[in-house]
Image (tube, rainbow, N blue to C red):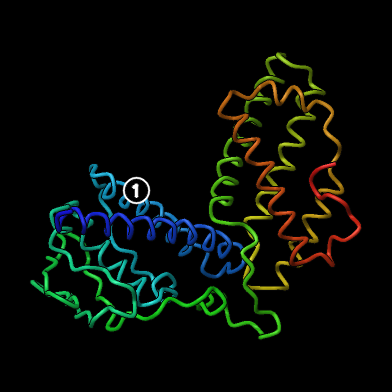
Amino acid sequence: MNVYNHQRIMWDARFEAMRDRKLNELVIFAAMVRTDQANRKEYLSIIEQIGRDLDVIEALAEGGKVPKSKPITSDLYRNRLSKYELLDEYCLDACRSGDLSKMKESPRLESPEKQSRIDAPEPSAKIEAPEEQSKIEAPDDVQRIEAPEEPQRLESPEKVEMLDQPMDDSDSTFVMLVPIEDAVTLKKVRDMKDGKIDFFIDAEMSGRFKEAACEDVISFLKTDLNLIDNILSINIRSKKDIEEKISSIIELVEEADEPKYQKIYLNSLNQDEKSLEASYNMVLKRFEETLKSHYSYLIEEKGSLFFE
């Protein structure tokens, strides 16, 4: 394997790691919009910028046209990153111009323990690697972000710096109730079900389906949207918030009316939507299993929360 292909494989691995981290950050900052109203606008801006970064990463990884973007400079975002994650950001920022030839010249990204000192970027600044020194030119028309001085070992989730305002130790926790892939699925399901509400509103107004049937479908679709919003808004770093949200979810499910016209809804789905609906049920099953594993005292003797 030649050097370029070797480095390309290493960059692909970094892009995949960055993509996974930023998908996780979407979930975290979406929760912060609800839990920290004072900084709501900045969190929404960060979410938008993370979305653009995901497009940039995808374009770089696939060799496509890189969309215009700028580094995320918000302290609310950057202060939560480890120095190794800041190194990822620095390398991503250096490639925002879309000049993939820089990958060939970029230093090797070893594990955090093997990283050498990273000097602050200036014109023709060098990033020192353990075996050689290679230059990363300052990207055109992109605000330069200073690289961290000493990349550090990635900590376990329990030791990651919290985004919330400082909490009492008794309330601090970290339980990944919903894996990143499931959170992404829930967002897709939410968009699909939101669109179906519009579909059945139009069907009711046009007389395509009976009014009672449409109202029933719209009602349980709104319950699903409420359920998804509750799940995605859980602050996984606060035991109190987790317990309150679980209680809200239990109350929501118990008060929801039994769907009478669910078959009409299922018949309205195309093949992709049916597949997404099946994935939604699997996500709920995994979520329920996680709750029973970590918070059984809240749901004991209730049987299945979401399925009979």
The residue furthest right is 301
**Residue 79: image location, x then y, percent:** 41, 76
Residue 289 appears left or right of 165? right
Q: Residue at x 23, y 44 (%)?
A: 63
**Residue 152: image location, x then y, percent:** 36, 81
How many numbered markers are drawn?
1
Quarter of the image where one finds residue 220: top right
Label 1 packing within 10 angstroms: few (<14), some (14-19), many (20+): some
Q: Residue at x 58, y 57 (%)?
A: 179
Q: Which residue is mark 1?
A: 55
Q: Residue at x 36, y 71 (%)?
A: 85
Q: Is residue 248 above or below residue 131?
A: above
**Callout 1, which amino acid?**
Asp
Q: Is residue 34 above or below residue 67?
A: below
**Residue 246: image location, x then y, percent:** 76, 61
Quarter of the image where one finds residue 243: bottom right
Residue 93 appears left or right of 178? left
The residue furthest bottom is 169
- Secondary structure, mark 1, is helix
Q: Residue at x 61, y 67 (%)?
A: 35
Quadrant showing the C terminus: top right
Q: Is residue 205 above or below residue 23?
A: above
